[in-house]
């Protein structure tokens, strides 16, 4: 923690050039546009504050905060996304900082460079700018090679989080963010939970976390139980269901749970998810490979104990046997087309 209360995240990308100086604008004279530094450049007094950044554009607003594109004052190329929470989170605040700390080090998770504090002491995360927005913007179905690439990155991002005792709990297309360079990463750790270590799970009450958070359409059946809680394995399995729904949605080009044209209520979703068959790739989807069908099936077991883990999915043929070059190229093209649309 710096004297100003700024939490700085450790670097995860040593190939990026870091700011070592204290002066504004000394960060990265040769940086390309949208280059993100890690850790962020220092302000004039060596303590990073919200007032060191100037507004460039609005990026969006969600339930937990407002996100803007910002620039470090005095620079032209140092752009970030700044997510300022709507409210201070006195209890969850420490946990949230710890979630972000544990998330560093994976190229498949949107990087948080620092946590600043807003006027009302609400957390403000200085994030890597994902300049192509979220995959929810993609119109229509994703071609399978691009989907395999997205799935791979999400599985790798989740494997990183789960191995470090964090459940994301809000995996959905809106929270997979892309860059114009053709990258896609998991973002939005605002409802993520720190999990107790499996070895400490002898005392039931202390070994469970609430999983009744997140976005209803992507929630697994067990999350609809009153005060739904899970141990570390169950909380990670909840993420895997959400991943399966996300992959299926990106494949179909619409939400898979209820007819696309409906705007379902919470109860309709609960009934469909808890009482219906798990969603799957339709039999008549001729374009779907066997690998994709099996991947979705491995994620979407109603019994969380039967779902694959993120570590197992890393070896799944849909991920491990994809054509690397073709899938990366396909993802780049989809992102480019979406940005131009
Ligand atoms: N790092 C980023 N770079 C670019 N855009 C971003 C970034 N992070 C978030 N956004 C955009 O800002 C908007 C709101 O972000 P986000 O979904 O994280 O907020 P939220 O309050 O957590 O939303 P939700 O209600 O879904 O939980 C979204 O449109 C998202 O795509």
Image: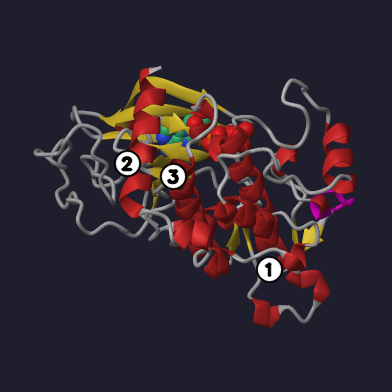
Residue 282, picture quadrant: top right
- Could you tell whether 279 is left or right of 311 in the image? right
Within-10-Å neighbours for mark 1: few <14, some 14–19, many 20+: many
At 80% across and 56% down in the image, what residue appears? 302
Q: Secondary structure at mark 3?
A: helix
Q: Earlier in the sequence, mark 1 or mark 3?
A: 3
Q: Which percent across, then down, holds residue 312? A: 56, 69
Q: CA distance from mark 2 to mark 3?
A: 9 Å
- Could you tell whether 34 is left or right of 225 in the image? left
At 60% across and 56% down in the image, what residue appears? 295
Q: Secondary structure at mark 1?
A: helix
Within-10-Å neighbours for mark 3: few <14, some 14–19, many 20+: many
Residue 239 is covered by the magenta coloring: no
Tell which of 253 and 179 is nearer to you.
253
* Callout 1–callout 2 Cβ contact below 8 Å: no
* Callout 2–callout 3 Cβ contact below 8 Å: yes
Q: Which percent across, then down, holds residue 162? A: 56, 65
Disc 2: which residue: 329
Tell which of 216 and 47 is nearer to you.
216
Q: Of discs 1 and 3, which sits in the foreground? A: 3
Residue 136 in sight from this viewpoint: yes
- Could you tell whether 255 is left or right of 73 in the image? right
- Magenta range is 222-227
Disc 3: which residue: 145
Q: CA distance from mark 1 to mark 3?
A: 32 Å
Q: Earlier in the sequence, mark 1 or mark 2?
A: 1
Residue at the far top in the pictured view: 341
Disc 1: which residue: 232
């Amino acid at each position: 923690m710096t004297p100003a209360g700024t939490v700085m995240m450790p670097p995860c990308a040593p190939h990026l050039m870091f700011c070592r100086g204290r002066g504004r604008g000394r960060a990265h004279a040769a940086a390309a546009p949208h280059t993100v530094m890690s850790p962020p450049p220092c302000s004039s007094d060596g303590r990073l504050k919200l007032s060191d950044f100037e507004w460039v554009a609005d990026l969006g607003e969600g339930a937990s905060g407002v996100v803007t594109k910002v620039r470090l004052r005095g620079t032209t190329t140092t752009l970030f996304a700044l997510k300022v929470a709507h409210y201070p989170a006195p209890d969850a605040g420490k946990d949230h900082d710890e979630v972000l700390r544990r998330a560093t080090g994976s190229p498949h998770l949107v990087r948080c460079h620092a946590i600043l504090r807003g006027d009302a002491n609400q957390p403000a995360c200085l994030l890597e700018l994902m300049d192509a927005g979220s995959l929810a913007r993609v119109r229509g179905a994703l071609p399978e090679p691009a989907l395999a690439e997205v799935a791979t990155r999400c599985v790798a991002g989740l494997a990183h989080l789960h191995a470090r005792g964090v459940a994301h709990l809000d995996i959905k297309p809106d929270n997979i963010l892309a860059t114009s360079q053709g990258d896609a990463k998991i973002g939005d750790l605002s409802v993520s939970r720190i999990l107790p270590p499996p070895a400490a799970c002898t005392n039931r009450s202390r070994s469970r976390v609430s999983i009744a958070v997140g976005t209803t359409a992507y929630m697994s059946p067990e999350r609809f139980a009153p005060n739904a809680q899970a141990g570390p394995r169950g909380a990670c399995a909840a993420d895997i269901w959400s991943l399966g729904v996300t992959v299926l949605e990106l494949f179909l080009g619409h939400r898979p749970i209820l007819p696309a044209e409906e705007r379902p209520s919470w109860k309709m979703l609960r009934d469909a998810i808890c009482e219906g068959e798990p969603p799957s790739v339709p039999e008549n989807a001729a374009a779907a490979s066997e690998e994709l069908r099996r991947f979705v099936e491995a994620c979407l077991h109603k019994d969380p104990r039967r779902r694959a883990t993120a570590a197992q999915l890393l070896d799944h043929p849909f991920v491990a046997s994809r054509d690397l070059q073709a899938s990366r190229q396909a993802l780049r093209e989809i992102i480019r087309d979406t940005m131009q649309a």
